[in-house]
Image (cartoon, rainbow, N blue to C red):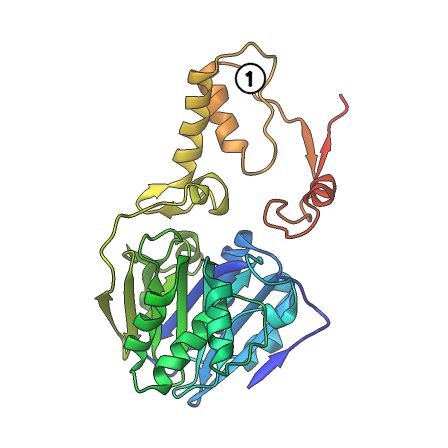
C-alpha cells in the first residue's frame, strides 16, 4: 500500500532502519526520531516503510520530517519493523515521485532506501529498459531495485540478488532494504564511501541501521560497529549475519567530516568535531595571518573557526545573522545563492 500527501511536500539523503524481535513493539516513533536526527543530510523529502501484517506500508512526502509525519500518520505506521529515508537529489528531480523508500513489485516484494550516487546509472537504465523494465522515477535508486528484482525473477534468493546488483553498480552508496518476509538487508559499496553503522536498542530488543551515529544516539541505541565496506548485512529473526562481497581499499569521503555529517557523529571511529577543529588549527599553522577577528560562516565552519582562533590567538567574533528556518544551502538543488541570502545576513556593525 502506498500513501502520499501532496500538500506537505519537499526532499534528501540518509537511511535508517529498525527491526525489533518483539511483535508488540512499535518502531514508527523510533524511525521518526532517527530521521529527525539525520535531517541535516537533506530536506527535500522524507519517507517511511513498515511491515504490517505481512504487507509493506509506505508513507512519504516532500518536506522536513516534522512536516511530513503527523502523530496520526505515525499511528497508522505502527509496526515492529521498518526503514526510513530523507533525501536531497543526487540524481533525479525534487519531486514526490523520487521520494524514498521506493517499493518494488517482485517476489518477494521489497522497499529500498538509498544514499549515494550511481555513476553508470544511464547505462544500466538503458539496459533495463531494453529488457522491458518501466521506470516511474528519475532516481538512481530505481535502477538498484530493478537489478535486484531482475535477479529474483531469475531464481536468485534475496542475498544473491543484492550481490548481483552490487556487482553491476559503479558508484558510492549505502542502502537498506525491507522485504515483505520481514528481512532487512543493509549493504555498502566496495570502498565504504558513504557511511553506515549498526546499533542495538536494548529496551525494544531492536537492531538499528543508521547513516550516522547521531541517528543511533537520538533513539538511545548502543553503537555496535560501522558496516564494513563491500558487505551485505542481513537482519532477520533478531539475528544479524554478514557476507563480504568485496575486499578493497577503504576510501573515505572527506566531505562527511567537513560538511555532510553532524558535529556530534563519529564516522569510521573518528569524531566529526575533532576533525573540523584540527582542520582549523592546521589552516592557522599553514597560513598565519594578521587579522582583527576570525568570523565563522554558520553553521558548519564554526568549529573550524574555533580551531583557527585557538591556534592563531585571533579572537573569534560573530559576523552574520542567521535565519534558523532556512535550509542547508550546499545540498539544496536549486539557486544556492538565493538560499544563502535567506540564511545569512552580514552584521552591519
Across and down, in percent, residue 231 comes to 27, 62
Q: Position of residue 285 (x, y in %)?
A: 42, 16
Q: Quadrant of the N terminus?
A: bottom right
Rendered location of residue 160, percent (x, y): 28, 76
Picture residue at 42% right of the left edge, 89% below the top: 54
Q: Which residue is mark 1?
A: 315
Whole-percent x and y of residue 27? 44, 73
Left or right: 324, with 267 as reference point: right
User: Can residue 37 be seen at all in this image of the molecule?
Assistant: yes
Is residue 106 placed above or below 230 in the rendered structure? Answer: below
In the image: residue 99, left or right of residue 78: right
Counting other residues with Cα less than 10 Å from the Cα at mark 1, is it few (<14), some (14-19), or many (20 or more)? some
Image quadrant assignment for residue 178: bottom left
Residue at 61%, 23% (x, y): give it: 317
Q: How many marks?
A: 1
User: Viewer-proximal residue, 262 or 220?
Assistant: 262
> Image point 60% across, 45% down: which residue?
330
- SS at badge 1: loop
Question: Quick one: which residue is furthest to the top in this view?
Answer: 290
Q: In this rendering, does residue 30 appear at all? A: no
Q: Where is residue 201, by image quadrant?
A: bottom left
Quadrant where the C terminus sits is: top right
- The residue at the far right in this view is 348
Amino acid at each position: 500500500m502506498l500513501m502520499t500527501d501532496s500538500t506537505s511536500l519537499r526532499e534528501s539523503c540518509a537511511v535508517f532502519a529498525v527491526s525489533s524481535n518483539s511483535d508488540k513493539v512499535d518502531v514508527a516513533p523510533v524511525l521518526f526520531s532517527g530521521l529527525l536526527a539525520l535531517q541535516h543530510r537533506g530536506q527535500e523529502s522524507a519517507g517511511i516503510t513498515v511491515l504490517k501484517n505481512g504487507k509493506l506500508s509506505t508513507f512519504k512526502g516532500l518536506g522536513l520530517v516534522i512536516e511530513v509525519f503527523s502523530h496520526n500518520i505515525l499511528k497508522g505506521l505502527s509496526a515492529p519493523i521498518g526503514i526510513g529515508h530523507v533525501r536531497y537529489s543526487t540524481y533525479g528531480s525534487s519531486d514526490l515521485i523520487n521520494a524514498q523508500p521506493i517499493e518494488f513489485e517482485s517476489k518477494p516484494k521489497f522497499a529500498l532506501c538509498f544514499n549515494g550516487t550511481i555513476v553508470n546509472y544511464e547505462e544500466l537504465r538503458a539496459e533495463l529498459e531494453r529488457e522491458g523494465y518501466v521506470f516511474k522515477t528519475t532516481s538512481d535508486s530505481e535502477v538498484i531495485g530493478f537489478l535486484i528484482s531482475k535477479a529474483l525473477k531469475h531464481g536468485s534468493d534475496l542475498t544473491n540478488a543484492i550481490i548481483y546488483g552490487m556487482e553491476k553498480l559503479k558508484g558510492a552508496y549505502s542502502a537498506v532494504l525491507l522485504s515483505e518476509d520481514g528481512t532487512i538487508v543493509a549493504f555498502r559499496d566496495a570502498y565504504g564511501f558513504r557511511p553506515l553503522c549498526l546499533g542495538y536498542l536494548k529496551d525494544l530488543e531492536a537492531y538499528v541501521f543508521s547513516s550516522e551515529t547521531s541517528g543511533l544516539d537520538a533513539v538511545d541505541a548502543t553503537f555496535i560497529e560501522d558496516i564494513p565496506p563491500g558487505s551485505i548485512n542481513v537482519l532477520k529473526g533478531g539475528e544479524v549475519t554478514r557476507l563480504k562481497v568485496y575486499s578493497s581499499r577503504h576510501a573515505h569521503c572527506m566531505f562527511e567530516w567537513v560538511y555532510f555529517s553532524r558535529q556530534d557523529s563519529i564516522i569510521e571511529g573518528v569524531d566529526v568535531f575533532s576533525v573540523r577543529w584540527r582542520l582549523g588549527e592546521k589552516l592557522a599553522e599553514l597560513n598565519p595571518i594578521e587579522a582583527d577577528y576570525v568570523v565563522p560562516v554558520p553553521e558548519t565552519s564554526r568549529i573550524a573557526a574555533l580551531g583557527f582562533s585557538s591556534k592563531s590567538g585571533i579572537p573569534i567574533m560573530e559576523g552574520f545573522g542567521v535565519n534558523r528556518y532556512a535550509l542547508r544551502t550546499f545540498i539544496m538543488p536549486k539557486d544556492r545563492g538565493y538560499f544563502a541570502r535567506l540564511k545569512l545576513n552580514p552584521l552591519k556593525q
